[in-house]
Amino acid sequence: MDLNKILIIILFLGILICAQIFLRYFRISAQTEDLGRTQVRHVCRLAISTTERVDIVDVENQSFLIVFSKGSRPVIRELSCLRSDTVAEHKL
């Protein structure tokens, strides 16, 4: 092989590695800024069957019920009548 081709490949791989490091650094710093602004807390999980489960999640003092089922999209409903403290006490 020609020495020029080897140098071009090494230079190209170096640019790709630098781009990956650059993107990873800025993606992590952007995620930590977002986490500081919102408070998300997983309250509990209940397995209904082998293919279905229910999660209760608190997002900034609002509770949400998320139903996961195999082969379909998750369903998200706000729990306005129940608070997460009550649900945690009953240990669903």
Image (cartoon, grey):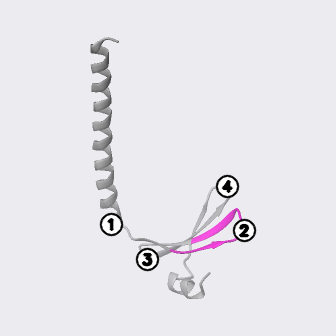
Quarter assignment of residue 11? top left
Residues at marks 1 and 2, CA–CA distance in whole angstroms = 35 Å
Which residue is identified by label 2? 49
Q: Which residues are magenta?
A: 43-55
**Left or right of residue 69, residue 89 in this image:** left
- Observer-side mark, 1 or 2, equals 2
- Observer-side mark, 2 or 3, equals 2
Q: Earlier in the sequence, mark 4 or mark 3?
A: 3
- Observer-side mark, 4 or 2, equals 2
Q: Earlier in the sequence, mark 4 or mark 2?
A: 2
Element under disc 4: loop
Residues at marks 4 and 2, CA–CA distance in whole angstroms = 15 Å
Q: Which residue occupies 33% across, 40% down?
A: 20
Q: Which residue occupies 27% across, 37% down?
A: 18
Give residue 85's position: percent from left, percent from top.
Answer: 50, 85
Residues at marks 4 and 3, CA–CA distance in whole angstroms = 28 Å
Which residue is identified by label 1? 37
Which residue is identified by label 4? 72
Residue 39 magenta-highlighted: no
Residues at marks 3 and 1, CA–CA distance in whole angstroms = 13 Å
Q: Which residue occupies 57% across, 82% down?
A: 81
**Left or right of residue 82, residue 32 in this image:** left
- Observer-side mark, 4 or 3, equals 4
Quarter assignment of residue 35? bottom left
Which residue is identified by label 3? 61
Element under disc 3: loop
- Amino acid on which disc 3 is placed: Asn
